[in-house]
Amino acid sequence: RQMMRTSARNTLLCKVAAVKPGPVNAEVLLKVSESIDLVAIITDGSVKTLDLVPGRDVFALIKSSFVLLAPAGEVGRTSARNVLTGTVARREDGAVNTEIILDLGEGKSITAMITRESASTLDFKVGDRAAALIKASHIILAVD
């Protein structure tokens, strides 16, 4: 059996901490590491199909274009359920877009693809503190 390959730049191995069912969708609380948590919103049907229960290993897939960035301390009020703070470890400017990798600590990182104009306006540099914002509905869950 081969391991799944995906175009999502961010694949985080997590443990399901809790599942809060709803009439249509469920909140799945994920433990990425000792100090990093995520919330994913998926259908109740997917919870059943994937057999998501506390303690189950699950992969959280997040496209880099779904990750918004803000300077740390300047996030403000937002509807994004997930805010992960880290240090800019790498910045790669392209003609149109910029790839920024945040080191979240504990061996975890998250990659964001933002416009080059936004990267320049926000002036992200290696070593800067930044926050990654991810909507709970933008997290795709997968199991082995």
Image (cartoon, grey):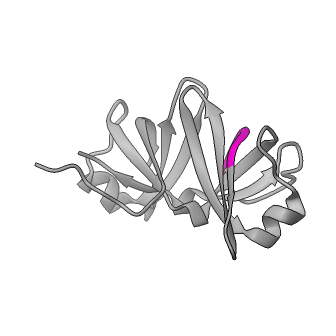
Q: How many marks?
A: 0
For the residue pair 26 and 91, the one nearer the viewer reads as 91
Reply yes or no: does residue 88 show up in magenta: yes
Image position, residue 100 (x, y; %): 67, 53
9 on left or right of 86? left
> What residue range appears in magenta?
81-90
Residue 45, image quadrant: bottom left
Q: Is residue 23 above or below residue 11?
A: below
For the residue pair 46 and 82, the one nearer the viewer reads as 82
14 on left or right of 50? right
**Does residue 23 show up?**
no
Residue 129, image quadrant: top right
Image quarter in which the C terminus is found = top left
- Give the prevailing secondary structure in the magenta stretch: strand
For the residue pair 42 and 138, the one nearer the viewer reads as 138
The residue positioned 50% from the left and 34% from the top of the image is 32
Q: Is residue 121 above or below residue 74?
A: below
Image position, residue 123 (x, y; %): 87, 56
Image position, residue 97 (x, y; %): 67, 70
